[in-house]
Image (cartoon, rainbow, N blue to C red):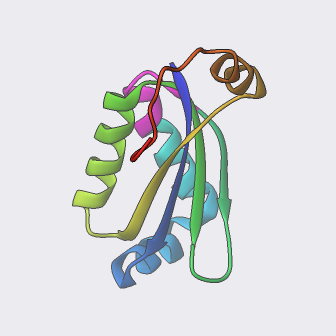
Amino acid sequence: MGRYLFQGTYTTEGVKGGLKDGGTGRRTAIEAAIKSIGGKVEGVYFAFGETDIYVIVDGIDHQQALAFAMGVGATGTVGNLRTTVLLTPEEIDAAAKTTLSYRAPGR
C-alpha cells in the first residue's frame, strides 16, 4: 500500500459545489470516497493559485488511486487532476541499495 498526493483545479461547477458544501463538507465527501476504497485521508488542503485542492491519501494501491482519480475526474468538477506517488525516506534508501545492471546508450 502506498501514499499519494492528488492535486486539482476546480471547474466552475466545482467552485459552485464548494460554495454550497464549504471546505469541511468537501473534506467529508473526500474522506468518504477514500474510505470506500479502503484508504485513509491524511490531509485535505485548499490553496490560492494554479492548484485549488491538495489531498494526501494513505493505504491504497495504484489501482485504487486510479479509481479515485477517474471517479473524481468523471464528475467534471475538478480539472487538471494530477496524481503523485509519495515515497518515504526508507523507500529511497532501499532503492539506492538495489543493484542495477544497465548499459547507457552508445556505451
Magenta segment range? Answer: 33-40
| Residue in the picture at 49% in, 46% down | 30
| Residue in the picture at 34% in, 79% down | 13
Q: Position of residue 60 (x, y in %)?
A: 46, 25
Quadrant of the rendered image containing residue 61: top left
Foreground of the two, 87 or 37: 87
Q: How many marks?
A: 0
Say above or below: 28 vs 99: below
Residue 78 horizontal side relative to residue 24, left or right: left
Q: Position of residue 82 (x, y in %)?
A: 44, 58
| Residue in the picture at 69% in, 15% down | 97
Q: In the rendered view of the protein, which quadrant contains the C terminus?
A: top left
Q: Is residue 50 magenta?
A: no
Q: Where is residue 31 in the image (x, y as percent from the top left)?
A: 52, 39
Quadrant of the rendered image containing residue 22: bottom right
| Residue in the picture at 42% in, 71% down | 17
Q: Which residue lies furthest to the left in this view?
A: 74
Say above or below: 94 vs 55: above
Residue 45 horizontal side relative to residue 50, left or right: right
Q: Where is residue 6 in the image (x, y as percent from the top left)?
A: 51, 52
Q: Is residue 34 magenta?
A: yes
Say above or below: 33 vs 49: above
Foreground of the two, 61 or 45: 61
